[in-house]
């Protein structure tokens, strides 16, 4: 019962939380924090149960089920037998890894948005967001997966559109000039873009059910599909827009830049991971033969994404856009890793997914914080921030070094394992992705040179760089995790080992 | 029994209009509840006349209908009070239209519903109301003429009007059905016949528009599907061609028209036309076992969300003078409860999950995929995603823009209860799909 409650309770109670705490705005964040900590503890408990299924010795049928399928059953609700439809909740090591990442990021996001305006509404929306995002990773029913997938867009629409930056943009529509706050443009673009591409996925899911008779992806057999290629491409478009992969990425720079920094963390850390998770689940695990057939396409998309976004990041002067493009570039590497279809590659993909979430988050947070303090986005107008804000600058440099793959950080292990597994699967030519590391070195070091070091500019000299304690604490935790898992990656690879054991793990 | 109770209550209610509107509302509410009870017991028109059948699926939409009409009656105020009696009459006649299994009665009751709708829109207060009412009336009269022409042709060729025993072979029945559909498409606001609806829905009193675009359209959808089911099965190629074509042009055109509107009511009117397009997909997919489930689900979801949206717009118009999109600015702060209900129902119209609008679309579209029409369904799905653009634009004005003044708007108790009923329907049918599908799909 716990499982279904932690999905639906936040969805229905968040409005109540809002109306109850509207008068005392400072309380809401403690409620949110407490709820996310509860989510984290529940996820840890599930991780423990999956890593040690022997604890189910008292229930032999559950133990047998976990051993044969790898999934921990959490119940089946809302059955509709005539439609073969029900809310099946079961999780394996991959879902638990995503749940842990999600709840950890949500906790840290509460700290980093400690001083946000209109707190009752903001944190109620965060609580609302926690429901469907858990649902996405917990259900194995494709239609419910889609429903939760779409529902995550609603709180994001409000979080970006209301709490975003104050930039104004002038758009020309039919020769009429429209003055529009950029945040609203970004929020609606994000919503529409991902919604439209999700529709391809929606039809793909319908065809899956039509051709196999099951909504549950653990029961679907690839051999019984009549048109696997069509379904594969329909689903791939949905995930590609979320990831985002090169031609479908244009929503991301807008949304990430205009969103408040903490929400950029959620976008980069959780929403992009939904795309990668879907890609692993619905292409690699569900349709291995078709994926093998189209693997080269995935590699091409992945490489194109990595290099295109990398070059754009070098060119970019806007600090948060630079971070956003670097985020896209790293997701391209994840796509290449997934396309290898091997145990090594998928483990590397999972490691890089978690690493990317932890590395890119402090970069977004500091970029947003710098804008908040200096009121400029452009690195040319900054400079010498190290002198005035040494704490934030140090963390920016550490996270930046992790993004470019410095040994001892998560970025290094992620990139190294991806290159090794890709070379193993595709041959030597794929080693060109090592160039991606060089490109990221280019933009990160140049950004550090322009913004953090150098002579203090007039804008920086005037600004006051105060950072509240919870924000400092949040950043410190991110930094600690980057270095900790960089030095000791084994815990994540243990989970990956469990998650991808069907590909011949240890 | 339920029919008699509703009509009797409709005759009593006007006595209390002048003195005590509260008693009138209570009588209406009790009549709706008692009628629902008798339907639950299986004693509707079917216990009196042989031409009516009450099955589980019909029961379900009748409950949705009665709940919605009760919600509308509760939220009426001021000069809208004559509508209460019409709610009761409409409920009674709609029960007949939904339950009948006789083509002759279908045509007769269809006309009665049409006449009630003319009386609904005849509550004229200004020039715009008059224009909307005249347009609805003339379009309805034309539609009636066309339907009767087709029906006359059909009646020459068949021995029986019973849905199961109708004679459908030969050229004449096919031509007759085509002519009748042309008339019914007026009522369903399918695209070449939609012109009147865009004006009528947006210009008549919004409470009447809620009934016209929400309730009557849903009832007509289900009744038409039942009446023409035998033809659609017998002529699969013609069915797929006609309904897919009209579905695609209806939703595409209406969505693009809605994008360019500035009046809120007109956006909702075009969105209602677009929804007719989505609802035609189960018609095209009549061969699928899920087609009836799809149409029933669509009607039930639509009856709740569309009615609710127009009722809130009615409150907005009365309390804040909302006409154009820019009048909505900042209402999210000034009227938080109204805006919350409005937002949820708009998201339901847009097809956001966990709301009835999504599951209705999912089942209706799945019927299409099941019948092998996946390219049509893909167009429909992309259309419904595109529609989010204008729905999100309404939300943007509600929440993201600054208010012009700061006076808060309170929700009246009747309106609140009515909206809660409609919201309960939207959320219940958005999560629990079992009721509709179990009552329609049998293996």
Image: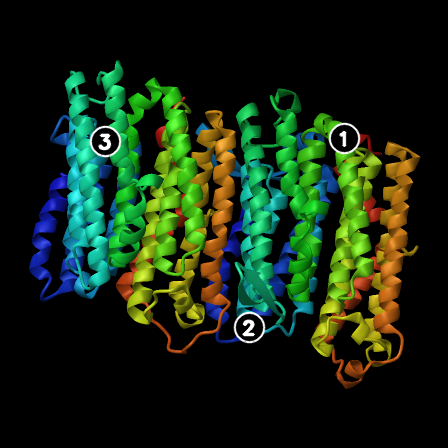
Which residue lies under the disc numbered 3? B54
Vertical relation: A450 (above or below) B430: below
Q: Is residue B425 visible?
A: no
What residue is drawn where x is 46% and y is 55%? B390
The location of residue A217, given as percent across then percent down, is 61, 32
Q: Nearer the viewer, mark 2 or mark 1?
A: 2
Q: Is residue B93 visible?
A: yes
Q: Chain of mark 1?
A: A
Local crowd size for mark 3, using a 10 Å CA cut-off: few (<14), some (14–19), many (≥20)? many
Vertical relation: A179 (above or below) B212: below
For mark 2, give the secondary structure: loop
Q: Chain of mark 3?
A: B
For mark 3, give the secondary structure: loop
Horizontal relation, residue A185 to residue B123: left or right: right
Do callouts 2 and 1 mark residues in contact (Cβ within 8 Å)?
Answer: no
Q: CA distance from mark 3 to mark 1?
A: 53 Å
Residue at mark 2 shares a chain with residue at mark 1: yes
What residue is drawn where x is 77% and y is 67%? A475
Residue at mark 2 shares a chain with residue at mark 3: no
For mark 1, give the secondary structure: helix
Q: Which residue occupies the foreground of this view, A36 or B99?
A: B99
Vertical relation: B350 (above or below) B96: below
Local crowd size for mark 1, using a 10 Å CA cut-off: few (<14), some (14–19), many (≥20)? some
The location of residue B340, given as percent across then percent down, is 42, 61
Horizontal relation, residue B264 to residue B167: left or right: right
As drawn, the label of residue A502 is 1
Report which quarter residue A184 is drawn in: bottom right
Quarter of the image for the C terminus of chain B: give it.
Answer: top left
Horizontal relation, residue A362 to residue A89: left or right: right
Which residue lies under the disc numbered 2? A118
Residue at mark 3 shares a chain with residue at mark 1: no
Horizontal relation, residue B134 to residue B232: left or right: left
């Amino acid at each position: 019962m716990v499982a279904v409650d932690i999905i639906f309770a936040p969805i229905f109670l968040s409005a109540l939380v809002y109306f109850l705490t509207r008068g005392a705005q400072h309380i809401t964040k403690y409620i949110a924090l407490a709820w996310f900590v509860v989510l984290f503890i529940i996820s840890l408990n599930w991780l423990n149960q999956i890593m040690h299924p022997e604890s189910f010795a008292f229930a032999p049928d559950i133990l047998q089920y976990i051993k044969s399928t790898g999934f921990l059953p959490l119940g089946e609700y809302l059955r509709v037998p005539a439609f073969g439809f029900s809310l099946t909740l079961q999780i394996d090591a991959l879902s638990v890894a995503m749940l842990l990442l999600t709840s950890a990021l949500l906790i840290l996001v509460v700290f980093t948005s400690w001083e946000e305006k209109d707190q009752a509404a903001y944190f109620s929306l965060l609580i609302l967001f926690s429901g469907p995002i858990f649902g996405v990773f917990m259900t194995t029913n494709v239609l419910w997966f889609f429903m939760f997938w779409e529902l995550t867009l609603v709180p994001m629409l409000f979080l970006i559109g209301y709490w975003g930056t104050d930039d104004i943009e002038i758009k020309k529509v039919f020769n009429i000039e429209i003055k529009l706050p950029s945040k609203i443009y970004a929020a609606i673009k994000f919503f529409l873009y991902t919604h439209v591409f999700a529709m391809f996925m929606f039809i793909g899911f319908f065809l899956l059910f039509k051709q196999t008779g099951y909504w549950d992806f653990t029961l679907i057999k690839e051999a019984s599909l009549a048109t696997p290629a069509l379904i594969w491409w329909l689903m791939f478009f949905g995930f590609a827009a979320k990831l985002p992969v090169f031609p479908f990425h244009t929503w991301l720079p807008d949304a990430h830049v205009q969103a408040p920094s903490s929400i950029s963390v959620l976008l980069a850390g959780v929403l992009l991971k939904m795309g990668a998770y879907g890609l692993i689940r619905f292409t690699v695990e569900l349709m291995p033969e078709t994926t093998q057939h189209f693997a080269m396409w995935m590699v091409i998309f992945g490489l194109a994404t990595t290099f295109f976004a990398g070059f754009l990041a070098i060119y970019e002067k806007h600090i948060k856009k630079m971070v956003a493009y670097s985020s896209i570039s790293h997701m391209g590497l994840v796509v290449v890793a997934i396309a290898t279809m091997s145990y090594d590659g998928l483990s590397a993909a999972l490691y890089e997914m978690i690493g990317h979430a932890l590395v890119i988050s402090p970069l977004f947070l500091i970029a947003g914080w710098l804008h908040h303090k200096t009121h400029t986005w452009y690195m040319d107008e900054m400079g010498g921030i190290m002198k005035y804000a040494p704490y934030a600058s140090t963390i920016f440099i550490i996270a930046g070094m992790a993004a470019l793959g410095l040994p001892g950080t998560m970025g290094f292990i992620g990139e190294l394992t991806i290159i090794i597994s890709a070379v193993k699967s595709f041959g030597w030519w794929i080693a060109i992705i090592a160039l991606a590391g060089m490109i990221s070195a280019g933009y990160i070091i140049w950004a550090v040179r322009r913004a953090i070091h150098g002579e203090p500019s007039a804008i920086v000299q005037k600004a006051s760089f105060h950072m509240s304690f919870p924000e400092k604490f949040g950043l410190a935790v991110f930094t600690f995790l980057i270095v900790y898992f960089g030095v000791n990656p084994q815990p994540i690879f243990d989970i990956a080992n469990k998650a991808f054991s069907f590909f011949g793990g240890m | 029994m339920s029919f008699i109770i509703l009509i009797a209550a409709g005759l009593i209610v006007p006595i209390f209009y002048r003195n005590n509107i509260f008693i009138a509302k209570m009588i209406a509410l009790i009549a709706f509840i008692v009628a629902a009870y008798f339907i639950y017991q299986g004693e509707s028109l079917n216990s009196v006349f042989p031409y009516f059948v009450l099955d589980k699926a019909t029961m379900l939409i009748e409950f949705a209908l009665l709940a919605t009409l009760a919600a509308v009656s509760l939220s009426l105020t001021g000069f809208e009070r004559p509508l209460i009696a019409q709610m009761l009459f409409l409920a009674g006649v709609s029960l007949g239209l939904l339950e009948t299994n006789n083509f002759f009665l279908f045509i007769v009751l269809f006309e009665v519903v049409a006449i009630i709708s003319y009386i609904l829109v005849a509550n004229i207060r200004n020039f715009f109301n008059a224009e909307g009412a005249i347009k609805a009336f003339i379009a309805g009269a034309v539609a009636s003429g066309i339907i009767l022409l087709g029906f006359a042709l059909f009646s020459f060729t068949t021995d029986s009007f019973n849905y199961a025993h109708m004679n459908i072979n030969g050229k004449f029945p096919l031509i007759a059905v085509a002519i009748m559909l042309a008339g019914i498409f007026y009522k369903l606001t399918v695209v070449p016949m939609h012109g009147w609806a865009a004006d009528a829905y947006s210009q008549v009193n919004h409470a009447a528009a809620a009934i016209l675009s929400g309730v009557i359209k849903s009832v007509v959808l289900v009744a038409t599907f039942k009446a023409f089911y035998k033809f659609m099965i017998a002529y699969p190629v013609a069915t797929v061609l006609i309904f897919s074509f009209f579905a695609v042009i209806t939703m595409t055109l209406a969505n693009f028209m809605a994008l360019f509107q500035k009046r809120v009511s007109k956006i909702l009117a075009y969105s209602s036309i677009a929804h007719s397009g989505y609802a035609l997909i189960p018609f095209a997919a009549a061969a699928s076992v899920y087609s009836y489930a799809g149409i029933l689900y669509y009607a039930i979801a639509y009856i709740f969300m569309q009615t609710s949206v127009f009722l809130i717009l009615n409150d907005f118009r009365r309390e804040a003078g909302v006409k154009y999109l820019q009048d909505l600015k900042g209402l999210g702060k000034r009227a938080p409860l109204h805006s919350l209900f409005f937002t949820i129902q708009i998201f339901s119209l847009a097809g956001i999950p966990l709301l009835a609008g999504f599951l209705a679309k999912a089942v209706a579209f799945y019927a299409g995929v099941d019948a092998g029409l996946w390219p049509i369904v893909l167009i429909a799905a992309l259309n419904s995603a595109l529609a989010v653009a204008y729905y999100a634009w309404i939300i943007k004005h509600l929440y993201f823009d600054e208010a012009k003044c700061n006076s808060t708007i309170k929700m009246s108790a009747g309106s609140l209860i009515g909206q809660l009923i409609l919201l309960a329907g939207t959320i219940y049918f958005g999560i629990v799909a079992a009721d509709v599908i179990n009552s329609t799909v049998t293996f």
